[in-house]
Image: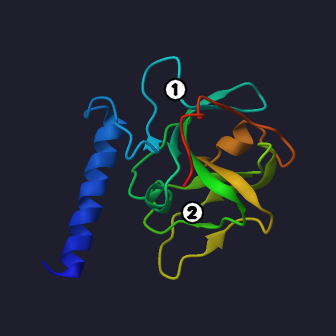
Amino acid sequence: MGRPAMRRMTMVLDLVLATMILAGCGGSPVAQSGTATAPVAGSSDPRVILPDGSSIAVEVVADPESRARGLMYRPSLADDRGMLFLFPEPDVHSFWMKDTLIPLDMIWLDPERRVIAVERDVPPCQADPCPSYGPSAEALYVLELAAGQAAAHGIEPGDVLELRDIGQYKAR
């Protein structure tokens, strides 16, 4: 099988898996290498508490492969869900929307979980080359939410977000 065919097959499998997770058809999601998982029922669900007190269930991605994949190929993202990217150390982390199907809000946080930048309503990339988004300041975390949620919850630079039940994840 040639490289383009393998790439298409991988993309299709990623889409099927993401659809199963979003639809709840695959049972409880299992962590990949213990570093990434989707939220499952229970008191220790990874969550982000926003400044207005709202709670967002997050899928935590803490390894290079999961961070690179991010929310690619996902057909939707509920308003009370998100993806939290953990990095091993603070750095300038830029993101792009290649193969991302839905518009997103991106929120960069420093090691104290203080919001250092917000990109609102970032559209899916329609053609290469895709633009990159991100601040010139160093961040340790990035939170992705459905487009419009940062504004709906009044998230602004300087706000501090609370990260709950993410201690079992180690960025690498």
Toward the viewer: 126 or 113?
113
Quadrant location, the N terminus: bottom left
Q: Residue furthest top?
A: 43
Q: Earlier in the sequence, mark 1 or mark 2?
A: 1
* Picture quadrant where residue 135 is located: bottom right
Residue 23 is tagged as none
Toward the viewer: 137 or 15?
137
Q: Crowding at label 2, few (<14), some or many (≥20) Cα neighbours within 10 Å?
A: some
Amino acid type of disc 2? Pro
Query: Where is mark 2, residue-wise?
Result: 123
Q: Nearer the viewer, mark 1 or mark 2?
A: 1
Q: Which residue: 25% across, 34% down?
A: 26
Residue 45 is tagged as 1
Q: Secondary structure at mark 2?
A: loop
Q: Which residue: 44% across, 46% down?
A: 76
Q: Are marks 1 and 2 in contact (CB under 8 Å)?
A: no
* Picture quadrant where residue 27 is located: top left
Q: Secondary structure at mark 1?
A: loop
Image height of 44 relative to 114, above or below? above
Name the spot of residue 23 as percent of width and height, x first. Answer: 32, 35
Image height of 58 relative to 98, above or below? above
129 lies left or right of 27: right
Name the spot of residue 68 as percent of width and height, x first. Answer: 48, 63
Amino acid type of disc 1? Asp
125 lies left or right of 152: left
Name the spot of residue 31 as percent of width and height, x first. Answer: 39, 40
Quadrant location, the C terminus: bottom right
